[in-house]
Amino acid sequence: MAAEASQAPPDDAAQRALTHLVAELDRCIEELEQARARADVLLRHRQAGGAWLEIVTGESRPLIVERISTVLSRLASAGHVWRREQAAALQGEQVSINRIAALFGVTRQRISALLREPDAAPASTRD
């Protein structure tokens, strides 16, 4: 019995989604660190008396706001997949939609819609 408890659970869609989210978070942290460094450079130029037009037109691509937009989009996408797969995994463990909704802080209608999305087949049918 003790040996069974120490074994890792089988890989599943929710675990894959969470692994992808972690990787995406790492990429986004790197992207935001680069945006932060670039913002420091722009701030130093402005504090040294540079005109905004000069500062903005001299900024190399990707622009700070482009980096931020990319990060927000990637996090929203990966986070949505994680939430959907997590809800499907909970449903596969016989957790009620009402309970999942309470855990996620949303309505039961939102969870129902989430679970109806094409990639949200019950966990037991995807493994």
Image (spheres, rainbow, N blue to C red):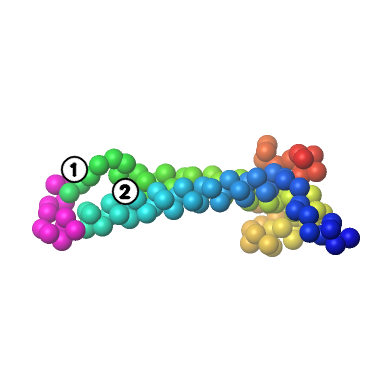
Task: Tell me the CA gap for discs 2 and 1.
Answer: 13 Å
Three-letter code, disc 2: Ile
Q: Residue placed at 65% from the left, 45% from the top?
A: 16
Three-letter code, disc 1: Thr
The one nearer the camera, 36 or 97, is 36
Chief secondary structure of the magenta portion: helix
Which residue has dot 1 on it?
Answer: 57
Crowd rating for badge 1 (residues with CA inside 10 Å; few <14, some 14–19, many 20+): few
Percent coordinates x, y for residue 62 in the rendering = 32, 41
Q: Which residues are magenta?
A: 44-54
Q: Secondary structure at mark 2?
A: helix
Q: Residue furthest top?
A: 118
Which residue has dot 2 on it?
Answer: 64
Q: Report the side of 100 relative to 35 (left or right).
A: right
Q: Secondary structure at mark 1?
A: helix
Tell me if I can see residue 46 in this picture.
yes
Tell me if I can see residue 80 in this picture.
no
Q: Residue placed at 85% from the left, 62% from the top?
A: 2
Mark 2 or 1 closer to N-term? 1
Residue 80 is inside the magenta segment: no
